[in-house]
Image (cartoon, grey):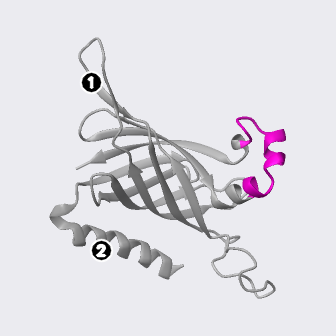
Amino acid sequence: MFKDTILLLSLLVSVLFANGSQASSVYWEAQTGALMGVGHVSLGVGISERHFVSVGVGYVPKLSSHAEMSLYSFKYRYQNPASWNFELPNGAKFSVLPFNIGFTYLLGYDDALYFDLPDQYPSEYYAPTGKRIVFNYQPIVRLNTNLELYVDFSILDVGLIGYVREPDFFYENYDFLGLSGITTWGAGMRYQF
């Protein structure tokens, strides 16, 4: 647990200092949903014009179906250069960047999650429940050079595995080619310094 947190922080700090003047932007973002918890805040950096990484913390409150949980994340995002520019009748301008993908390495902490398999399971029987990979698709609305709003569509690694192994189950029981059974969404904002 502690090792993973230190690793995430070390990655961000090394990217910030390694790039120095080459970093295209430093930003913070706030998000809710899309497997990131009720609230999730991140600090990130653009390591080039199209590649961005961030480290964040999130929170899930206690509910009847699960315990309170804290989340830590390392996110990577590829931002496609395609954009559509719009101007409103009042003269306000904004851009839509529709094709952005990424992944998140997510660490969850509560009493029911674990980072090493319990002794009764063979080595590599399945992945520890406290560590997950989340795949993201993120259309962005850029309101100005500093402020962006986005919708985040996410698929958890185990959801994708289930979809690939049993596609007929998802086609028959969920909408949109079965993708509604494995996809979740959230919204967020990003502010660049």
113 within the magenta span = no
| Quadrant of res 86 | top left
Instruction: Look at 70% across and 55% down and name the residue there.
Output: 159
- Relative to 39, does residue 149 appear above or below in the rendering? above
Residue farthest to the top, as pictured: 89
Residue at the disc numbered 1: 93
Task: Find the magenta span and give its range.
Answer: 162-178
Q: Is residue 36 visible?
A: no
Residue 48 at x, y percent in the picture = 27, 57
Dominant secondary structure of the residues highlighted in magenta in the image: helix
Q: Which type of secondary structure does the marked residue at label 1 adopt?
A: strand
Q: Is residue 27 left or right of residue 35?
A: left
Q: Counting other residues with Cα less than 10 Å from the Cα at mark 2, is it few (<14), some (14-19), or many (20 or more)?
A: few
Label 1 crowd bin: few (<14), some (14–19), many (20+), radius 10 Å? few
Q: Which mark is residue 190?
A: none
Q: Amino acid at mark 1?
A: Lys
Compared to residue 117, the image places residue 85 above or below, namely above
Q: Is residue 45 left or right of residue 105?
A: left
Q: Locate residue 18, reporting x and y percent.
A: 23, 72
Q: Which image quarter: residue 139?
A: top left
Residue type at mark 2 is Ser
**Residue located beneath label 2 in the image:** 14
Q: In the rendered view, would you say 133 is above or below 39?
A: below
Task: Give the answer, above or below, for where 147 lies relative to 58.
Answer: above
The secondary structure type at the circle numbered 2 is: helix
